Amino acid sequence: MADIYDVVIIGGGPGGYNCAIRAGQLGLKVVCIESRGKLGGTCLNVGCIPSKALLHASHLFDAAQNEFASLGIKTGKVELDLTQMMAQKADAVEGLTKGIEFLFKKNKVDYLKGRGKILGKGKVEVELTEGGKQVLETKNIVIATGSEPTTLPGIEIDEERIVSNTGALSLKAVPKKLVLIGAGVIGLEMGSVWARLGSEVTVVEYLDRILPPADAEVAKDAERIFKKQGLTFKLGTKVTGVEKTKSKLKVNIEPAKGGDTETLDADVVIVAIGRKPYTDGLGLENVGGKTDKRGVIEVTDHFKVTDGVWAVGDCIPGPMLAHKAEDDGTAVAELIAGKAGHVDYNLVPSVVYTNPEMAWVGKNEEELKAAGVDYAKGKFPFMANSRARTNHQTLGFVKILTEKGTDKILGAHMIGTGVGEMIAEICVAMEFGAASEDIARTSHAHPTLSEAVRQAAMAVEGWAMQM
Ligand SMILES: Cc1cc2nc3c(=O)[nH]c(=O)nc-3n(C[C@H](O)[C@H](O)[C@H](O)COP(=O)(O)OP(=O)(O)OC[C@H]3O[C@@H](n4cnc5c(N)ncnc54)[C@H](O)[C@@H]3O)c2cc1C
């Protein structure tokens, strides 16, 4: 009879693999089961990493055509080699997935390729990829099965012409006309890539604004900038169907509140309306696990589904982000090892990797107003930041929100070059319960973009010195 595991993890994405590595570090006997044949989950294989590889390459392609000349760099004719752009993306993914296999070995984590199914308390059956079945016995089961794309009723994704975020990362040619359904983070990142590579992009969004979770002021500025970059927005509009002809797609739209219908021509349609938890064939019911009507697994504040069964990442409540899944997984490994483990979802940052980037953490102005919080606000534009001006990257601003009276930071909202890195400073400050004055009185190197964060913190109490 095989040994009994301390932890069996189902799913090898950021939630599962980080849980496995931390459990290994803590001396637990752990195995991770993954069905896609590669570790890294959605994030490494069809999410964060390939999308960032294409965003980076397409940004340079755009910059070479539209920015380099003004910096005194003559490039001659710039041409797109889409095959090579996709190959460098695959290379980045391959290297990173292999890296996780190395980390598993280093931390004595067993890795099984196959599909896991919970048979009951302490029992997981694995349908092995290489054939056959194996039943594992364990003291703890961690569900880290992640999420999958959702679509609209009547719109069938074929991953060739009507694509989800997965197909959108592997198009074989640049579509002339691209319709993007959904103006959320993933949609806008994908729309930016293909617009930079030459597509005419129309974004159809049901709500009357883009980026619903972002601060409204940031979203408004982003919309203005994206329009200048050539994206067309149809806001407050719903897609009622997509008709396929041999050569074209016809996207039928109408105002969300009702009214005249319109048809948009497209070569490719990207459906980016969100993702839903993935729990197909998992056997959750065999341990009394429950999901809500969206399929989200119900857990306690400390990730428990039921005794000896835990769940982390995209399949439980909270932001569907890789670093949130990572934090969940780490916390569960620590809880199983008898340590403390907790994640504050209010301090999980969000980043949109467009150009310029957007980043935020904590509460936005709309949320503070709705909660009746008396808040103060400090704002500083990159136009007044010396490094931004030197680099001709003056779009956007930093906004810091604090509690009136205590000056405690409640949230920060940024749009501008490099803000995806700069938001980490605010996360650390908020973890320590900092006031805006703490940031305002902290030395920031000159000339850096992060001086804008310091100036925004000064602006909260009205003493921004560079504007
Ligand atoms: C296009 C795109 C871009 C994104 N960009 C970002 C970004 O920039 N930053 C960010 O933070 N987040 C980003 N995300 C979100 C991020 O990818 C997810 O939040 C993250 O991957 C969730 O991690 P997870 O471990 O919960 O699930 P997943 O990464 O989905 O991993 C779950 C794994 O479990 C496996 N699995 C499922 N069922 C079973 C089973 N029964 N047996 C065995 N294996 C199973 C699946 O094959 C999968 O590999 C992006 C997502 C997409 C789609």
Image (cartoon, grey):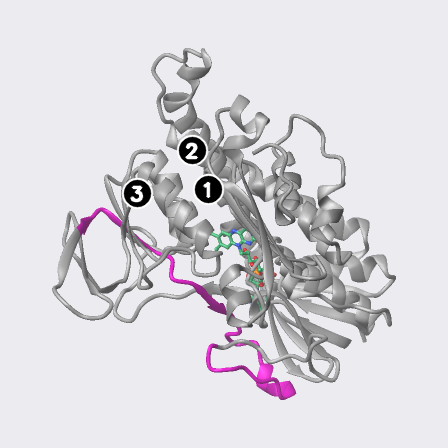
Please tell me whether residue 15 is drawn above or below residue 452 in the rendered image: below
Label 1: which residue?
354
Residue at 34%, 15% (x, y): give it.
77
Q: Nearer the viewer, residue 191 or 51?
A: 191
Task: Nearest to the eye among marks 2 and 1: give it.
Answer: 1
Residue 137 location, x and y as percent?
Answer: 76, 77
Displayed-image quarter of ligand 1 = bottom right
Between marks 3 and 1, how big is the CA–CA gap?
12 Å
Q: Which quadrant is home to the C terminus?
A: top right
Magenta region: 265-294
**Amino acid type shown at disc 3:** Leu
Q: Earlier in the sequence, mark 3 or mark 1?
A: 3
Residue 455 location, x and y as percent?
Answer: 63, 39
Question: Is residue 299 shown left or right of residue 106?
Answer: left
Disc 3 C-beta below 8 A from ligand 1? no
Is residue 266 magenta-colored? yes
Label 3: which residue?
231
Residue 58 got which mark? 2
Secondary structure, mark 3, is loop
Q: Earlier in the sequence, mark 2 or mark 1?
A: 2
Q: Earlier in the sequence, mark 2 or mark 3?
A: 2
Please tell me whether residue 117 is drawn above or below residue 259 in the rendered image: below
**Amino acid type shown at disc 1:** Thr
Q: Are marks 2 and 3 in contact (CB under 8 Å)?
A: no
Residue at 68%, 44% (x, y): give it.
99
Between marks 2 and 3, how big is the CA–CA gap?
15 Å
Question: Is residue 273 shown left or right of residue 418?
Answer: left
Q: Can residue 5 be seen by looking at this rendering?
A: yes
Q: Can residue 362 be seen by looking at this rendering?
A: no
